[in-house]
Each structure stands twice: as C-alpha cells, then as structure tokens.
Amino acid sequence: MTALPQAHPAPPAPPEDSLIEDHNRRLEQLLEQTDLEGMSPAAVLGWADAQFPGRAVISTSFQYSGLVMIHMAAQAGLQLRWATVDTLRLHPETYAFIKDLEAQYQRPIEVHRPDPDQVRMMVERHGEYLFFDSKFKQEHCCQIRKVRPHDQLLRGAHCWIAGNRRDQSGHREGHTPKGSLVAEYGTPRKILKLFPMADWSEKQLLEYMEAHQVPRHPLYDQGYTSIGCLICSTPVLPGEPKRAGRWRWFNGANTAEPADDKKECGLHYSI
C-alpha cells in the first residue's frame, strides 16, 4: 500500500499578519470595555489621545462639530492630529479659513489631496461636471476627490475622529454610534472610528462656540448648514432639512429618498 503523504501543519502567519491580528484584537477589547456612550466629547478626545499617542486624527471639513473638537483638543493640550481633504473644489472661504485656524491655534492642519492622474482620467472619461448626470457618477466623483485621499490620510492611524451627529439627518440618527470599528481600505487592519459629538445638538454646539469664542466657518453666515465642495454644497432655505443643500439636484419629486437621508460622500456610509 502506498503511504499517504504526511500532513504538515499550516505555516505560521507572517509577523506582519500576527501584528495586525493583535492590533485588531486590542481595538475590539477597547471598544467592548469602554463606555464611550457615557463619556463627554472632551473625555472621548482625551481617551483617544492617551490610547493612541500620535496615531489618532481629527478629520474635519470645518463644520461646527469639527471646530468644537479642535478647540477642545487645543485647550486640553492634546496631541491629536488635525487633518482635512482638499478635493480641489472647495469654496474660497474654506481655503482662507484653514489659514485662519492655523494662525489661531499655532498648529498645522494636514491637507490631503486627490491623485491628479485619477482626477484627470475621471474628467476625460465623464466630463468636468459628471456629478449632475447621475447619483452613481456623483458618488464616483466623491470617491476620487474625497474618499481615496481620505484613505491615504488614515494610513498609519489607529483612531479616526469625525464630527457626525445624530441630529444631522434621519440616516445619521440611526447610524452614528460614538465608537465602531472600520476596515482600512485594502488591508485587514481595523481602525477605531469615533464620533465624540454624536449626541450633541446644534444648539449645544453653538452655545459652546459662543462661550469659548470658537472660530466659525464664514459659510454658515451665508446660509450653509453642510460644507463641502463648491458646487455640491449650497445654502439651505428656511424649513429645509440640514443636508438639503448637499447635491441639491437630487432633492426633486422623483428622488426616492428624503432630501436629508443617506446623502453621503462615502466616508461614513458604504455606497
């Protein structure tokens, strides 16, 4: 009888895979053992700074929540990174405001931009204003100009801090936990995603900003309630949902979803 080949145990995982597994397990344990929902925004920021020194980043487009978190971090002397994505289509007021914030806090803000070749190929294939054609093309534009640069922003980060709040839209009301795990794009590595301001209202934010003289993005005074790209974010009329100004041409009667629901660029909602 011919002897069967002897079975060999599976080779051990490469060291980098083992390190990723340990990293992911640590994040899972932290999330399980920490009552983030019961913590104040300032406490969440301080906890993130202590748990992930040099590896936690506040990613913001300079709306109320991001501005309050930057102020809280500065006041507490936290070493959290501050970062944003320049889609190359931001309002002039936003570019000026970035410089104002850096001067105010004497801290640099990391600015991440899209790959110029990817932008060029997109425009050559679909046109400069492809986002008007369909929701699919709008989402594609957001992927190229915002999501992919943001993926690069998160390279090496263990903790991503964003300013989403439950009162911003019907979708966000049910999809904004203070802490969750997300996968780093293209790898099995997990990142802890925090929404420290999730349970704050706009009223609370405005009261904090007034009490602490937090710099305010000038577009708010022009009627904006959501700030993004030059064409894709517009002022909101009285009585409209807060995110009605995003991609306004999808607000019509033929749109299947409410004006404020699931209007996302892809950073916080899988599209």
Image (tube, rainbow, N blue to C red):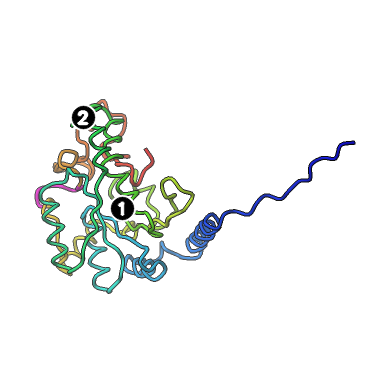
User: Mark 2 highlights which residue?
Assistant: 132
Q: Amino acid at mark 1?
A: Asn
Where is residue 41? Give x, y as percent. Answer: 32, 65
Above/below status of 250 relative to 14: above
Where is residue 12? Give x, y as percent. Answer: 63, 54
Mark 1 residue element: loop
Above/below status of 55 relative to 6: below
User: Do residues under tags 1 and 2 come within 8 Å of each other at their CB atoms?
Assistant: no
Mark 2 residue element: helix
Residue stretch in magenta: 221-227
Where is residue 267? Give x, y as percent. Answer: 33, 46
> Looking at this rendering, what residue extends furthest in the right direction?
1
Task: Decide which of 264, 166 is in the foreground and name it.
Answer: 264
Q: Residues within 10 Å of mark 1 (few under 14, many from 20)?
A: many
Q: Quadrant of the N terminus?
A: top right
Where is residue 146? Give x, y as percent. Answer: 27, 44
Task: Decide which of 61, 38 is in the foreground and name it.
Answer: 61
> What residue is at 12 percent from the left and 50 percent from the top?
219
> What residue is at 26 percent from the left and 38 percent from the top?
117
Residue 104 quadrant: bottom left
> What residue is at 22 percent from the left and 29 percent from the top?
124
Label 1, label 2: how far apart the Cα atoms are: 26 Å
Say if the magenta span includes residue 92: no
Say if the magenta span includes residue 225: yes
Magenta stretch, main secondary structure class: loop
Q: Amino acid at mark 2?
A: Phe
Residue 199 quadrant: bottom left
Q: Residues within 10 Å of mark 2 (few under 14, many from 20)?
A: some
Q: Which mark is residue 164?
A: 1
Q: Quadrant of the C terminus?
A: top left
Above/below status of 100 relative to 243: below
**Lower sequence index among marks 1 and 2:** 2
